[in-house]
Image (cartoon, rainbow, N blue to C red):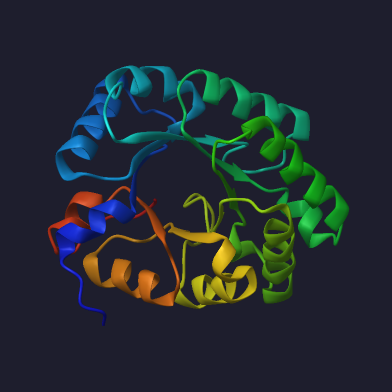
Amino acid sequence: MMKIEPAALAQYIDHTLLAADATRDQIATLCREAQEHGFYSVCVNSGQVPYAASLLKGQQVKVCAVVGFPLGAGLSNTKAFEAQQAIAAGAGEIDMVLNVGALKDGLLDLVRDDIAAVKQACGAVPLKVILETCLLEDAQKTSACEICRELNVAFVKTSTGFSRSGASVEDVALMRKVVGAGVDVKASGGVRDYATAVAMIEAGATRLGTSSGIAIVSGAAASGSGY
């Protein structure tokens, strides 16, 4: 295991709350915790962006919004509009779910166009593309990563945390191998403790999406399930 102090992992963490029933009090707590611990961002649903952005105005912590979440099965122009509106409301990063069904059907042009539409809407704002790796075969993961590399997105991301399972070391390593050094890799879903966080970074992750950030930076194990 690589030598890294638990507190140093804060810079890798998107502190995440994506539950459908998340309240403003919970969002406020999320933002406060992110500031206190020095997390890279808070990751929230697009409807929570205006409030989170108002709480973090002038702070180093970014607001990250998910788009087309968690299924990725919406219309491309809808995803692009959601991204555009989230950015206008204060989002500094966008995490979109790609069209998983189209990818499994081998409709790679459709997958590419879907991602490209959101990337265009993002402009200079970094775009992360969620593959939902637990639903894909390795060849499909590879194709998705190749498309993302060609489009020069900021990140490929493993999972929503809302499907069958989350990130695995093997998937992170595969994604890193395919995208090379020019695209970052975000591991999300099931990253709940220090050891898992370090294993994902060793495999090639440069960002971690988790609701267990405080447990990770304290070096403790976290309990529970989900993101």
Residue 227 location (% of width, % of height) = 39, 51
Q: How many marks?
A: 0
Residue 16 seen in render? yes
For the point 62% across and 24% down, the residue is 84
Q: Residue at x 51, y 76 (%)?
A: 173
Q: Is residue 189 left or right of residue 24?
A: right
The residue nearer to you, when weighing 184 against 47, is 184
Which one is nearer the viewer's eye here, 68 or 122? 122
Percent across and percent down for residue 214 are: 19, 50
> Is residue 121 toward the left or the right of residue 156 in the image?
right
Q: Which percent across, then down, holds residue 22?
A: 36, 28
**Could you tell me which quadrant the N terminus lies in?**
bottom left
**Above or below, comparing residue 69 to residue 147 in the picture:** above
Q: As displayed, is residue 146 above or below residue 98?
A: below
User: Is any atom of residue 75 visible in this view?
Assistant: no
Between 120 and 187, which is closer to the camera in this rendering?
A: 120
Q: Height in image: 222 above or below 124?
A: below
The residue at 73%/48% (across/down) is: 99
Q: Position of 12 compared to 106: left or right?
A: left
Q: Hey, which residue is sitting farthest bottom in the picture?
A: 1
**Residue shown at the point (37%, 22%) measured from the top left:** 53
Height in image: 112 above or below 53? below
Image coordinates of residue 224 in percent, x first then y, are 28, 55
